[in-house]
Image (cartoon, rainbow, N blue to C red):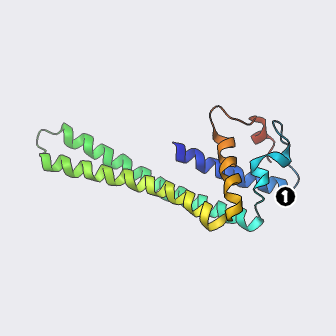
Amino acid sequence: MKKLMIVLAISFFAATAMSLESGEFNLVANSAAEHPCVKVNLTLDQISAIKNIVFKSSQVRAQDEANLKKAMLEVDHILASSTSTKEDAEKAQNNLQQAMAALAKAAAQLDLSINYDVLHADQREMGSLCAKYMYSFPPLVSNSIASNIK
């Protein structure tokens, strides 16, 4: 769930930068110049790259989530079966662990790709703060920010 929130933060992060380019961003909680999503100073190429990475990651994540659900169903089915063996259950458990690992790896790869393939070293701190600002709970920034992005 935390990784999903980070994906959403990056999406908002890119949308905020695009809104700044067109002058449509009105920040209610803080001045626009001080907000981490503004201070990161993304270029249009970086915004495009982040959008592509998030899109591709979403496709991988959807497949990994489906594989995880199938693996969970398989474990339930085997454990409830009167004809299954311990080896069957171990195999199903291993498949479940592999599906969970694949989902975690895809989420980690998203972070690595954005932080090291798109952001410059001097942008990483503000990029991280932007994600934390947007998707902390409770939010550190007014919800009206999102409604001001067109």
| Picture coordinates of residue 43, whole percent (x, y) | 77, 64
Against 53, is 2 above or below? above
Residue drawn at x 67%, y 63% is: 121
Nearer the observer, 148 or 42: 42
The number of numbered badges drawn on the structure is 1
Res. 116 image quadrant: bottom right
| Picture coordinates of residue 57, whole percent (x, y) | 54, 59
Q: Residues within 10 Å of mark 1 (few under 14, many from 20)?
A: few
Against 34, is 56 above or below? below
Q: Is 65 displayed left or right of 142 in the figure?
A: left
User: Which residue extends farthest top?
Assistant: 138
Res. 143 image quadrant: top right
Against 98, is 83 above or below? above
User: Which residue extends farthest right?
Assistant: 23
Which residue is denoted by mark 1 in the rendering? 21
Residue drawn at x 52%, y 58% is: 59
Q: Secondary structure at mark 1?
A: helix
Residue drawn at x 78%, y 59% is: 41
Residue drawn at x 13%, y 46% is: 86
Nearer the observer, 125 or 150: 125
Q: Amino acid at mark 1?
A: Glu
| Picture coordinates of residue 55, whole percent (x, y) | 59, 59
On the question of residue 50 being in view, the answer is yes
On the question of residue 25 being in view, the answer is no
| Picture coordinates of residue 63, whole percent (x, y) | 44, 56
